[in-house]
Image (cartoon, grey):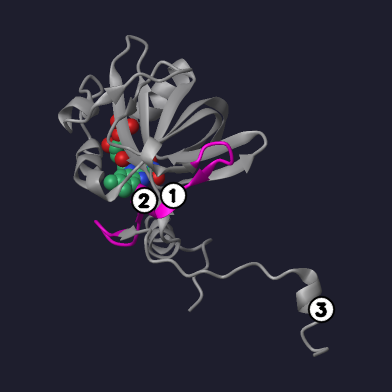
Amino acid sequence: MMFDFATTSPNNRYKLLTATVVPRPIAWVVTQDAQGGINMAPFSFFNAFSSNPPVLGVSIGGPHTDKDTLANIRATGQFVVCLVPESAVHAMNITAIDLPPEVDEMAEAKLTPVPSSLVKPPRVAESPVAFECQTHQLVPLGGNTLVLGTILAAHVQDDCVLDAAKCYVDTPKLGLIGRMHGGGGYARTTDIINVPRIPLADWQARDKG
Ligand SMILES: Cc1cc2nc3c(=O)[nH]c(=O)nc-3n(C[C@H](O)[C@H](O)[C@H](O)COP(=O)(O)O)c2cc1C
């Protein structure tokens, strides 16, 4: 079935995209307002886009007014993206509640702030991976704003680092989850299929015996 997006409502486009672009990693974004008040919320329109320069992107919606996360990023230019392990899924869900700007979602969800090294917003101890970011570019997308962030530093939980010199990470041990379809669907990242890349020479030699 073909859905012509020119005649599909924004709400139905959202349903088609979020039911099919799965699983999506979740950026659990920590920001601070100009007074230092902490804010935290999850965003699954998220991915990494470049390693040199190191850039990630988070798309934040809100057709009428900025969500607190976006307002804080506009005001300070700094944020921390934490990744979500299964053990923190319920805390993450609490931080998605539309609480007033002055409420610290991190405290509300009983999470533990850890000071960042290069930016003011903290990361959370309950997340095994965190990226300290500064705004690279804000791209207006109608009802959403795509926040592109330059990654200044990455934190990986010590017992999930296999070889620090080689930057090898024990990915399954991170226990991260991804966003699936429906109101509350999530996927684990521990069900792996290994498909090694095919060297060009092997591909070209496949019929030559
Ligand atoms: C798993 C999950 C993923 C979400 N992804 C997005 C997203 O990509 N973009 C968005 O604008 N809101 C997303 N939300 C909703 C925000 O988390 C929610 O609006 C939150 O209250 C925003 O908080 P803030 O106003 O403190 O920034 C998501 C919620 C959940 C639970």
Residue 15, located in which quarter of the rendered image?
bottom left
Occupied quadrant, residue 139: top right
Task: Point out residue 116 in the picture as x, y percentages from the top left corner.
Answer: 40, 20
Q: Mark 1 points at which residue?
A: 170
- On whether residue 180 falls in the magenta region, the answer is yes
Tag 2 near tag 1, CB within 8 Å: yes
- In this figure, which residue is indicated by the disc labeled 3? 204
Residue type, label 2:
Lys
* Mark 1 nearby-residue class (10 Å; few <14, some 14–19, many ≥20): some
Front residue of 148/170: it is 170
Q: Examine the rendered structure and indicate whether residue 70 appears above or below residue 128.
A: above
Cα separation, mark 2 vs mark 1, equals 5 Å
Asked which secondary structure carries label 2, the reply is helix
Measure how far apart labels 3 and 1 are at the Cα level.
34 Å
Answer yes or no: disc 1 within 8 Å of ligand 1.
no
Which contiguous range is marked in magenta?
163-186
Q: Does the residue labelled 2 lie within 8 Å of ligand 1?
A: no
Which residue corresponds to the image point at 41% horizontal and 15% vertical from the top-left?
120
Position of residue 126 relative to residue 205, above or below, is above
* Residue 98 appears anywhere in the view: yes
Q: Which residue is drawn at 78% across and 70% down?
A: 200
What's the residue at 20%, 23% (across, down)?
103
The residue closer to the viewer here, 8 or 159, is: 159
Which class describes the residues within 10 Å of circle 3: few (<14), some (14-19), or many (20+)? few
- Closer to the camera, 71 or 180? 180
Q: Which of marks 3 and 1 is nearer the N terminus?
A: 1
Q: Name the residue under label 2.
A: 173
Mark carried by residue 89: none
